[in-house]
Structures are given as structure tokens and as C-alpha cells.
Image (cartoon, grey):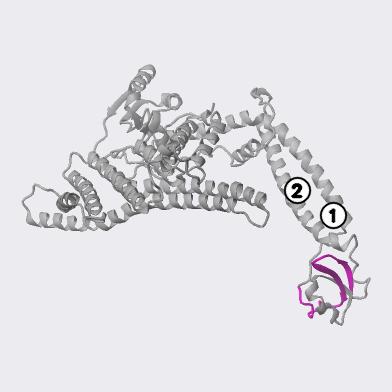
Amino acid sequence: MAIAPVAKVTFYGTTDQKQIVLDGLQELGCLHLLDLNQQGEEIIGERHLSPDVPQALKYLRSCPIQRRAVTKESAFHFDDVLAETLTNAQQQQELQSERDELQQAIEKLIPWGDFRFPSDNELDGLRLWFYVVPHARFRSVEESTAIWQIVAKDQRFVYVVIVSREEPHEISVPRVQLDDRPLSELRHRLETIETELEELHWQRVRLTRWIVLLSRMIGLAEDRAQRERAARNAFDDPSLFALQGWAPQSKLELIRAFTREHGLGLTVEAPTAEDSPPTLLSNRGLAAGGEDAVTFYTTPAYRTWDPSGVVFLSFSIFFAMIMADAGYAVLLVLILLAIWRRLGRSSNLLRFRTLFAAIAFASVVYGIAVGSYFGFPPPSGSLLNRLHVIDASDSALMMRISICIGVIHLAIANLALAWTRRWSPIMLSSIGWVAALFGGLAWGLGESGTQPQQTLIHYGSWGLQAGLLCVLLFSSSRPITTLNPITHGRRLLDGLLALAGVSRAFGDVLSYLRLFALGLASAQLAATFNDLANDPGGGLGGVLIVIAVVLGHGLNFVLAIMGGVVHGLRLNCIEFFGWSLPDEGYPFEPFRKRAT
């Protein structure tokens, strides 16, 4: 659970070595390049690659049936495969659109039968107007002076055709637009399209054998574009070049060996106060599971801290408190076991699997603690009943638990911020917020009981006052050792502005009440569906039980997952990061090869 320390490395070599060095550094894959020419160019991965190539690859990868991949490049004709794939995709899209239109046109024409529209001169200027009239409005047709004929009827509508030179306005419903082609012609065209779509499908299946080689071509083109961009960002002299970037300090020996092998010059510098290095998160074990949850919202600045471990633990707890049911938690465990192997195919999926497992474990433990199993309590006198140690129906208790969790979470955030400011007096401001949070909590708990707890009130008020005093005196970044009274006056003004954060702290702590509220809502929904199943009425008990159990609990389970993810992330990304990560950084992007 750390941000990997980096160093600024600069390579020096002759111009004829430049391309070889770039290729070798890309092979190493441990350098975040800097622009020595200050051109500020973005990486353009498609410089030598048409956007059609990723589109074609995505189209083939989404094919439900795939053939064994061909890996021999001698049999691969890139332009032909690309053109054939894009043509197939375009034709399939066009035919699917036409098929959908034909199906709608056929559905409209079926009640009217198979007929051909007369030409303009066949009826001496008369035209056919088609109406689908509800039975309740058929009187408007009967009262019409035009010639009309009923073509068909069903339980809801009467299908009427009116012969008139102009569109009748006395009909109470709008006329129906029908396709000009006969029904038999439409059906024949639909059959032809279905046959063509089937042929295109199998042609697409045949093309899937080129997926590996097509992917390799994309990687090669991206690698070439990256090298050209790196070449432009290097400093060039008629006979020499210089290339600079950030590298993890753990890779410095590998870089030194590379420079010796190629006969290059190398300088290594530690980051200075003026530098803004990229952030490379380095997590192993459980903390790695929280890394993606952190980078999903922000990238910590290089000189701050890595909250991955705290987010991993807190997100699991918050999710469990929002789900608040051991039965639903067991369903999570079963889902995890069903996809366990699939989640082991890459490092990103492995991190997600670790987080998923922690969420499932925490949900089971908390569900047992609150004694809820699909909304049912545990049997009296059983082991599960003895493990039921939290009364989730006690609103006052659950509110206290939620607020205590909020105070602890925000206190950890301020302690982490104090650690990053440990060489500055402003660190005491963060310590002051910790004291104020715990002091306010103790004071509130002492006042909220049936009888006031004077000890809690006494120490809580002292902690609150001492903490706010630290915030007032040490929130400013202005010099503290100066004898200039104006500077101290400005420091005091900065402190007064910082005290405005009291309302923010109060609101952020109360925001954690959502843990109680969402958990209570989930439990109440589960109990409601159980009550419906136990009291079906009307002689339809079996049907109502199935609806209540399958649909009701299924919906509640999905809502619990959505609430756990959304609000679990929100408490970490908004409240927690708002106190612990004042500065945002940018990620370490290695200059590496993508082609495999």
C-alpha cells in the first residue's frame, strides 16, 4: 500500500543510436517519458492505424462463434481481411435495419391482406385511406359521407378502408400508413434477407480466425506511433540526442545495465520540490483489491499517500452494512464461486476477485451479526441466534454505529493527511480535525443518552475545543516564525476561514447515516415480501409466493448490490478523499510495447 518512488533519468547517445535505444526502452517498459521539446503532444495511437481496424477487431471478437485462431503471418493478408470484415459488418447492419422495417410493415399489413395499391389513374383520381378504428369510435365512420368498407375485425379494432379523393376529416382516428408493396412481396424479401444474414454470419465466423493477427497489427501500429512520438519528444543535436523520463527506483539497476549495454550516458536525479512526478501505485495482497476503486475516481498526487488498503477495507464494510442480509450474502458467494476462474485471467480481474471476495465475506459476517436471512430472523436458541449481536431494528443504536463509523473514517483521512504534511506545522491542523471529530462524537454521545454522561460531555467538549483551536492556529501555510504582525494576522484570517469546515465535517459525518438507512430499507423490503408470501389470500397462494420470493427478493438483491456499490464508493470517493487527498496527480504511463 504505497506510491512507488521514482527518479528522473536522462539518456544521452549518438543520433545513429536513437532508434535502437527507443526500441530497447520500449521493450523494458518502465519509463514514463517527458517532452524535452515542450511540445505538449498527446499520444496518438492511431497515427499509422485507421480507426476501422479496432472497429473490425471489436466486430469479430463479439461474434458468438469463433474459429481456431491462425497465427501464421504468411497466410494473413491484412488489407483483404480488413476490407472483408468491414464490408460484412456494414452489410449486416443494413440488412438488419431493413429486416426490422419489413417486420413492422408486414405486421401492419396482415389485417388488410395481400393486395396491390392501384395506380393514380385506375380509380379516376380516387384514393384508398386506411383506418384502424376502436369499436367505441366506429360511429364516426358510419356517419361519414364517404364510401367505406370493413376489411377485418378483432376484439379491439375495426379495420376500415375509405375510398375518397381527399383525406376524410370526420374520422376520429388518424389514418394508417401502409407499405406500398404487396404483403407477399414483403414476405419474400424478408425471407431473402434472412438467408443473406445467415450467409453473412458464417462469413463472419470464418473471419474470426484472424483475430490474433489483427490484434497484433493494432499493437504493432500503436508501438510504432509511440516510438515516433518519443522520438519527437527527445532533444536532438546534429550528432547527439537526449531522452528523459521518470522511472521507478526499483528499476534503476535494470536501466543502468541497459545503458552500459548500449554505451549510453545516464544521469539519475531525485524529484525536486518543483517537479510533479507521475503516480505509480504499488500494491500487493489485499490492498491491491482497492487500487482500482481508487483510480476509478482519482489518482493520488505523488507526494500524498495511497489509500488503496483503507478503501479496500472500508468499501467492504460499507457494502456489507447496506446489504445487511446473510441470505443475500450467500448468493454473492455463489456468484463469486461460479465466476472464480474467469476472474483469474488477468491481473486486473485478480484484483477485482480479491475485492469481491472481501465484500462477500464481510456481507456474510455482518448479515449473521444482524440476524437476517432473506428477511427472516434465526431460529430461537440456535447458534445463529446466539451470533445475532446487533439489533438492526434499533434505530438509535444503528444511527450511533453509523456516525461512529463516519467519525473513524474521516479521522483516518485526516491522520493520513497529517502524515503527508509531517514536516510542516500545518500538520497540526489535520490533528486538530481528528480531535474535533472525536470530541464532537463523545460530546454528542454523552448528550444523546437517556441520562447525560458527564464524563463523555466533559472530555468531548475539551477535545472539540482543543481541536478547533489547532485548526484556527495552524491551517495557514504562511510562515509561523516571522515577527511580522501582518503575516500573523493573515494566518489568523486563514484559520477563521478554515473553521468554516465545521459545517462540512458535520454534514460529512451525517452522510454516513446512509449506511443505516439503506440497510434498514433492504431489511424492510425483504420482510414485506415475506409477509406477502405468508398471506397470499384469494386462493392463489402458490402464484403469489413465487412472485414474492423470486421477483421480490430478486429485485431487493439487485437494489442492495447497486446501493452497496454506489454509496460505498461515494463515501470513499467524496467524503473520505475530500479530507485525505487535497491534491490530484496523474498516472504513471509506461513507454512499453503493446504487441504480443
Q: In which quarter of the image is residue 101?
A: bottom right
Mark 1: give few (<14), some (14-19) or many (20+) Cα within 10 Å.
Answer: many
Q: Which of 455 and 171 is in front in this view?
A: 455
Would you say residue 536 sits in the magenta stretch? no
For mark 1, what is the residue?
186
Above-or-below relation of 544 to 16:
below
Q: Is residue 41 visible?
A: no
Question: Residues in magenta?
Answer: 149-173
* Percent of width and height locating residue 384: 44, 37
Q: How many marks?
A: 2
Q: Are marks 2 and 1 in contact (CB under 8 Å)?
A: no
Q: In this view, does 354 lie to the left or right of 253?
A: right
Residue 361 horizontal/vertical position (percent): 44, 35
Confirm whether the magenta stretch covers residue 160.
yes
Judged from this view, the residue extending furthest toward the left is: 483
Residue at image point 75% right, 35% down? 202
Please tell me in which quadrant of the rendered image residue 286 appears.
Answer: top left
Front-most of residues 27 and 560: 560
Check disc 1 and give the amino acid type.
Leu
Per the image, the residue denoted by label 2 is 95
Give x and y (percent) for residue 370: 42, 43
User: Quick check: 528 left or right of 248?
Assistant: right
Amino acid carrying mark 2 in the image? Leu
Give me the C-alpha separation between circle 2 and circle 1: 14 Å
